[in-house]
Every structure is written in C-alpha cells, then in structure tokens.
Amino acid sequence: MSRSHHIASVVPNRYPHWFTLSHIESQQCELASTMLTAAKGDVRRLETVLESIQKNIHSSSHIFKLAQDAFKIATLMDSLPDITLLKVSLELGLQVFPLFIITTVEDRNLTLCWWVQLFKSLTTIPSLGSIWNF
C-alpha cells in the first residue's frame, strides 16, 4: 500500500456518511425545484422533470416539498395558474399521500391537509377538470 493511500484511509472523513447523503438529497431537491420553475409553460419539459423526480427522489418529505414548490410556481399571482404545473403538483402530492396516512405524524398530516385545502381554494372547478386530462 502506498504511503498516500495509507494516509487517506487513516484520516477520517470530515462529515459522516449519513450527513453527506442527506446533503446530496437536499441539493437534488433544490435542483428539481429549479427545473420545475424553468419548465413552467412547457408540457414536454414538465413531463421530463416529473419523470426524473419520480425516478430519482425517494424521500417523501422532499417529494412533498417539490409538490408545494410546483403549486407555488403554478399559482404566481401575476398570471393565470399553469394547469400543467398544477397537475405535476397534484401528482407529486398524491405520490406521497399514502405515506402521510401511514406515518400518522401530526405535523405531516396538518401540512398535507393545508396543501390540499390551498390547492382546492385557489383552483377553479374547470381547472380541476382539465388537470385530469393532461
């Protein structure tokens, strides 16, 4: 074993493995949120971003955060709601909905109820109908 390799194996990492993984997952979530913003108004790009999120992000809290971000981006006050982005938000929210029911953590349930109520109050009935027909 070379001296440099031996030193590298003896010196402990600066951060524990779990911290590094958590940090990477958080950055991945931030990147996905940025991609949602960039894809607003482009159905094909939003479909690609949604597929990427569903394939690569596994944390229910990160997926829920992305659902909230997509909703906020879709309902900016300076324009009409982006129906396609609302559908992405709904799909991400529904993806984690069973996990929130199973875990029964009060904060998560309250957050989910808040999100559903907000979604319901800010969208119109015709908009909801068009969400289901992507």
Image: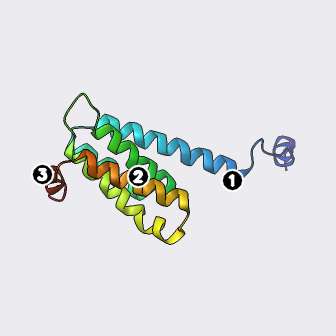
- Camera-nearest residue between 12 and 38: 38
Give the label on residue 18, or none.
1
- Camera-nearest residue between 51 and 1: 51
Q: Is residue 104 left or right of residue 132?
A: right
Dot 1 amino acid type = Trp
Question: From mark 1 to mark 3, how far is it between C-alphas?
Answer: 45 Å
Tell me, yes or no, if residue 72 can be seen here.
Answer: yes
Q: Residues within 10 Å of mark 1 (few under 14, many from 20)?
A: few
Question: Circles 3 and 2: CB distance less than 8 Å?
Answer: no
Question: From mark 3 to mark 2, how far is it between C-alphas?
Answer: 22 Å
Q: Position of residue 130 (x, y in %)?
A: 14, 53
Q: Residues within 10 Å of mark 3 (few under 14, many from 20)?
A: few
Question: Circles 1 and 3: CB distance less than 8 Å?
Answer: no
Looking at the image, is mark 1 or mark 3 earlier in the sequence? 1
Q: Position of residue 108 (x, y in %)?
A: 51, 58
Looking at the image, is mark 1 or mark 2 earlier in the sequence? 1
Which residue is at a point 54% across and 68% down the rendered structure image? 103
Q: Is residue 93 left or right of residue 25?
A: left
Determine which residue is flagged by label 2: 114
Give the label on residue 126, or none.
3
Q: Secondary structure at mark 1?
A: helix
Which residue is at a point 75% across and 49% down the rendered structure image? 16
Dot 2 amino acid type = Trp
Give the label on residue 65, or none.
none
Which residue is at a point 35% across and 62% down the rendered structure image? 94
Which residue is at a point 54% across and 61% down the rendered structure image? 106
Dot 3 amino acid type = Pro
Image quadrant in which the C terminus is located: bottom left
Tell me, yes or no, if residue 59 can be seen here.
Answer: no
Looking at the image, is mark 3 or mark 2 earlier in the sequence? 2
